[in-house]
Amino acid sequence: MASTPAIRTQFTQLLDLKTPVVLPPMAFASGGVLAAEVSLAGGFGFIGSGYDTTEKLRRDLETARTVLKVGPGSPLSIGVGFLGWILDKSEANSKELLALLVEYRVKAIWLAFGDNLSSWIQFVRELNQQSGGPPILVFVQVCSFQEALTAINEWKADVVVVQGIEAGGHGASYGLPLLTLLPLILANTPPNGPPIIGAGGLADGSQVAALLTLGASGAVLGTRFLLSPESLYSEAQRKVLVGADSSQSVRTMAFDNARGTVGWPKGIDGRGIRNATVDDYDKGVDTSVIRKKYEEASAKGDTDRIVVWAGTGVGSMKQILPAKDIVRELHEECLSRLRNASNLVIKE
Ligand SMILES: Cc1cc2nc3c(=O)[nH]c(=O)nc-3n(C[C@H](O)[C@H](O)[C@H](O)COP(=O)(O)O)c2cc1C
């Protein structure tokens, strides 16, 4: 990357990045190694804390420190993402988890999918202020125009992540395509507003460039990074992704029903690769039967039944590459598309 120029946007300037690419927090999929590798390569990576205990998150943060080669007390150029509805389950546990952000001096927190995000944002900001450390930037992922306005105007989010319905993993069943939702939000973001970045169904650097030309200041790619050896996905899950067609990526509650991960806010479901678990759920097979089969399949790593979350971009992802090579490829493709786009303008 030494010879390629950096791409400058409001977002890259805020975080001092070379590439406007973000690895989102992905529960059970983005740990300390993946997050750190993406940041090292010039993008910005999040650990997905998801359903983790404090001990598990601490281990991930220690791993990230090792990969980033920073000592205790030095800032950590990664973020950590939390699911709002999981934080709501136990205030005491969650406060302990969030205290790690300050202890490890992470650069950012990402919040999504909860009815009380504003109180968690306030808690983190107060904690941050008391610690006297550098500000922890607050990313809020939104799935609708209304949510975006709230995040921008009321919560004063530092970065707003606009998630389209194409996104892998959890999102709003009522969501809009990214190309529809993003311009709506951009048109209503005040000039001094936060950077807006887009997520959902993105596979390559041409799409990152497309978002930048729309006026977004960065792009989030989740599924694409699942196809790196550093993701926590198994070999078998990665094989499913490599072989999948985009039409196999479907929104469903089948996997949450099978795993018993219930409690998501109203209207939230998940996008993954259709398999026998989804077929059974759609046919109305009894939950106890589906769960039993799911447990057996999990023990064997049987991908005909277990969840493989994936966005609609999955059909264009055919290669497993180290995370740093993915970032480099996205950067170079994006640069080339931006140059091509500027060549479309007739010079007078
Ligand atoms: C395996 C997986 C796990 C995810 N976990 C989370 C999560 O814990 N928190 C969150 O806010 N978003 C989560 N997401 C959604 C991402 O934030 C992001 O919106 C999505 O990956 C973008 O779409 P793409 O996967 O098509 O690139 C997850 C996505 C995937 C694929």
Image (cartoon, rainbow, N blue to C red):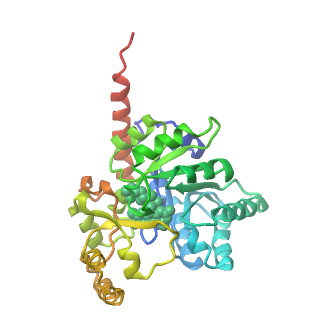
Residue in the image at 55% along x and 70% along y: 62
In the rendered image, the vertical position of residue 125 relative to residue 207, given as above or below? below
| Residue 168 showing in the rendered view | yes
- Where is the C terminus found, in terms of image quarters? top left
Q: Position of residue 164 (x, y in %)?
A: 42, 52
Between 340 and 103, the one lying in front of the other is 340
Between 151 and 56, the one lying in front of the other is 151
Residue 194 relative to residue 131: left or right:
left
Residue in the image at 40% along x and 36% along y: 3
Q: Position of residue 20 (x, y in %)?
A: 47, 44
Q: How many marks?
A: 0
Q: Image quadrant of residue 30?
A: bottom left
Q: Position of residue 331 (x, y in %)?
A: 39, 42
| Residue 26 showing in the rendered view | no
- Where is the N terminus found, in terms of image quarters? top left
Q: Quadrant of ligand 1?
A: bottom left
Q: Position of residue 182 (x, y in %)?
A: 47, 44
Between 165 and 203, the one lying in front of the other is 165
Residue in the image at 26% along x and 73% along y: 236
Residue 184 relative to residue 84: left or right:
left
Between 326 and 152, the one lying in front of the other is 152
Residue pushed farthest front? 284
Residue pushed farthest top? 348
Residue 111 relative to residue 309: left or right:
right
Residue 337 relative to residue 118: left or right:
left
Q: Image quadrant of residue 84?
A: bottom right
